[in-house]
Image: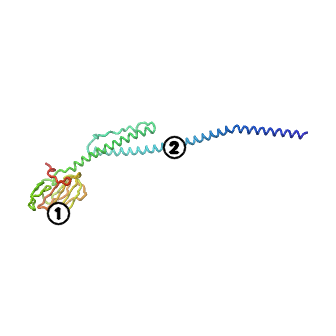
Amino acid sequence: MTRPASLAGANARFHLFDYRLLLLLLLVVLQLPVILYLYSQWQDAEQQQWQLGRQLEQQQRSQQRQLSRIGQRLGQLQAELGQLSAVGQRLVRDYDLVDELPVQRLDANLLQRPFNGFADLHLALTQVSEQTRAYGMTLAALESLLLSLHINEITQIQGSPVPGHSRINSSFGQRRDPFTGRTRWHRGLDFTGKQGQPIVATAAGVVSVVEQHPDFGGLVEINHGRGWTTRYAHLNTQLVQVGERVDKGQYIALMGRTGRATGVHLHYEVLKGNKQLDPARFLPN
């Protein structure tokens, strides 16, 4: 009688265990969607956090690049402003302009006010850059104009090639050739003087010819730009070389009697292109 009762108790406990296991499995099955949902939400949160981190890193890198470009641009603007300031000071010094430069002044306050983000700062930099460019173009144009006027002044042919008193022995135009006695066109002026008397450039320019010519003897020619040339002939000694830049009034040669000449003198010509002009037009009154 005892064994059947024990067996029945064991069976009852086994069935109870089965029910509990089944209940547990049922609970697990019922909770599984919730667990999976929570896990997926956690995964989404992790993914969003990772993406947000990447976006923050990209924004930081972008801001660093923008700051770097802004720093470079500020450096460029500072250098450009320094160059423009030097140009302005040179114009004031060289041409005695004082404060008469007809240019728009830069707004120095554009980069000294608070900015509302990168867009506002970028706009201010653009405005300063445009003003700097306009200021620089104006200064460059003004400098070019003043330099051109200065060049026109110093390269303008004027004055006597023989400093001090010197008599003109032969004028420009028709004359009797001293060697043949025939009428011949004289293309310049002949200045009489003494052997070794200094000859000067009548305008600034670049020496284009230094040679011994069969007719002109010792010869020097100076190119003054824009087609203007002066010619100095029958020289005893040339004091300049081809390619040398000479100033107005600078000694370039010594008077002589070389080439086809009857006496010590300077033959002086003024040419515009290939056309000889009367040098008397360029002598002082």
Residue ID at (31%, 40%)? 103
Dot 2, crowdedness within 10 Å: few (<14), some or many (≥20)?
few
CA gap, disc 1 to disc 2? 82 Å
Residue ID at (40%, 40%)? 126
Tag 1: amino acid: Pro
Dot 1, crowdedness within 10 Å: few (<14), some or many (≥20)?
few
Q: Residue 215 location, x and y as percent?
A: 16, 62
| Residue 274 or residue 105, whichever sits in front | 274
Q: Residue 47 location, x and y as percent?
A: 59, 42
Q: Secondary structure at mark 2?
A: helix
Q: Secondary structure at mark 1?
A: loop
Q: Residue 197 location, x and y as percent?
A: 15, 58
| Residue 7 or residue 240, whichever sits in front | 7
Residue ID at (41%, 39%)? 123
Tag 2: amino acid: Gln
Query: Which residue position is annotated with label 2?
Result: 58
Classify residue 256 as left or right of residue 21: left
Which label is found at residue 81? none
Q: Quadrant of residue 106?
A: top left
Q: Residue 129 location, x and y as percent?
A: 38, 42
Q: Is residue 196 above or below residue 92?
A: below
Query: Which residue position is annotated with label 1?
Result: 214
